[in-house]
Image: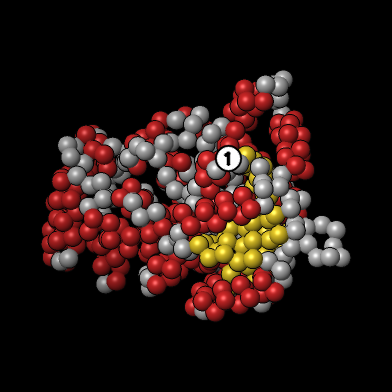
Amino acid sequence: MSGASTEAPFGERIDRALADTGLQRALGGTVGRLATARRDAFAALPEGDALRDAARAAKLGALASLDRHLEALARAVEANGGHVHWARDAAQARTIVIDIAHRAGAQTVVKSKSMATEEIALNPALEAAGLRVVETDLGEYIVQQAGEAPSHIIVPAIHKTRADVTDLFERVHGTDRKETAEALTAEARARLRQDFLGAEMGITGANFAIAATGSLVIVENEGNARLCSTLPRVHVAVMGMEKVVPDWPTVGTLLSLLARSATGQRMTSYVSVLGGPRGDDEVDGPEEFHLVLLDNGRSELLADPVLRESLACIRCGACLNACPVYGRIGGHAYGFAVPGPIGAVVAPTIQGTPDAAALPFASSLCGACRDVCPVRIDLPRMLLAQRARARRGDVSGLGRAERGLARMAARVLGSERRYRVATALLRGLTRGLSRFGPAQRLPGVAAWTGPRTLPEPAKEPFRRRWERDRG
């Protein structure tokens, strides 16, 4: 099974995903389990709502003073012996990392899971520069061996079944067929061990950076990020600039929500705090530490009063697991490193292509993403805003008939009298369509009506019942 090509239009990628029975089977189980685990974790946390309110206030407060926090972080990192690099866009970030690798004489680079490096397409650039790049997170390792991109923020290989991984390892590794998850994991671990020991440079992301101390916080369940950041001589962390927070209490609040929202755990297996290069009296750690602070459209989001809130995201993936659209098409169809509702909000600004501008239309606007977000980001409001902006560029994918119906609906809904007349006329028509199904074949709008089942209207409309009950 391969990821959907981003060279194809978004609509074609959706069609391929819906027709991929293996993908549907893989998504159906894992997405549901993650959503259930999150629900159970918060049910056991009586102060969950209060923590979410505190986390939202903390993140929005940090964004309000982001320039000050970034300057404080840079001073603290340098005081700890590290180096800070400012990358205005993806191209500059790639150049910075490649230059560090060449100066260090690196040949092999080990990487832990990082959405920022996926966003800037770092791996292909490193390989083009002559470096061998090894993903060490198990899910990332699987998709790298398959020649694919990650399909989920937290579970990169969510689109793969165990049988898929079994076939992949047998083909790529040329080893005996492994049938259990434990055996597959052991095979990957054995191959990665020598890479950890031999790599000259390690690259990680960062979940949070603390301005007051210059510390990076990395959360994980496998321990590979610790190995990437401590064994090689050089450690490079690539981090979106919005990840900086002022102090430890803020990190404590966010950590209490991150794992619960992502996997349903109270806490991940490993929480690493990195303070810079190895000191003279320390045994572990790199000789050099470099922090690459990535803008790549974030300044534009920060300056936007509607979209600024998207930078409060802590990349837990809960909105993906709750989204009925992501649950059907997976991550590859989005064509952006961060899929799902949050990706559909930020991609039009960060990626800036007509294809990315169409992503906000892949939403039912049901609000489930907002309901599960640990920092209560109002994703539906921002999706609507991005849709309105996309309409000005005519990238919505709507045909002439659909645009005409949308204008007609706007006119009807703008007048109570017209609304009452129209609903009265439509009741009989809708009842007939729901019984005989011709709506699925209406010319011009079949793309919208085809996947939907038209319900039969109630015998008495809600408005009439409401007016009667009030009287």
Q: Is residue 322 above or below residue 188?
A: below
Residue drawn at 46 percent across, 46 percent down: 326
To which quarter of the image does residue 217 belong? Answer: bottom right
Residue drawn at 57 percent across, 37 percent down: 143
Mark 1 neighbour density, 10 Å: few (under 14) some (14–19) many (20 or more): some
Tell me how the rendering is colored.
secondary structure
Q: Is residue 258 above or below residue 355?
A: below
Depth check, front residue: 42 or 173: 173
Lateral position of residue 418 relative to residue 454, left or right: left
Residue drawn at 25 percent across, 67 percent down: 467
Depth check, front residue: 46 or 27: 27
Q: Is residue 92 above or below residue 432?
A: below
> Can the viewer see residue 437 in this picture?
yes
Q: Quadrant of the C terminus?
A: bottom left
Depth check, front residue: 386 or 54: 386
Name the secondary structure under disc 1: loop
Q: Amino acid at mark 1?
A: Gly
Q: Which residue is mark 1?
A: 130
Q: Residue 24: image x %, image y %?
A: 48, 34
Depth check, front residue: 457 or 240: 240
Q: Residue 389: image x %, image y %?
A: 28, 61
Lateral position of residue 407 relative to residue 368, left or right: left
Q: Residue 124: image x %, image y %?
A: 52, 42
> Can the viewer see residue 432 in this picture?
no
Residue drawn at 28 percent across, 56 percent down: 390
Lateral position of residue 289 relative to residue 145, left or right: right
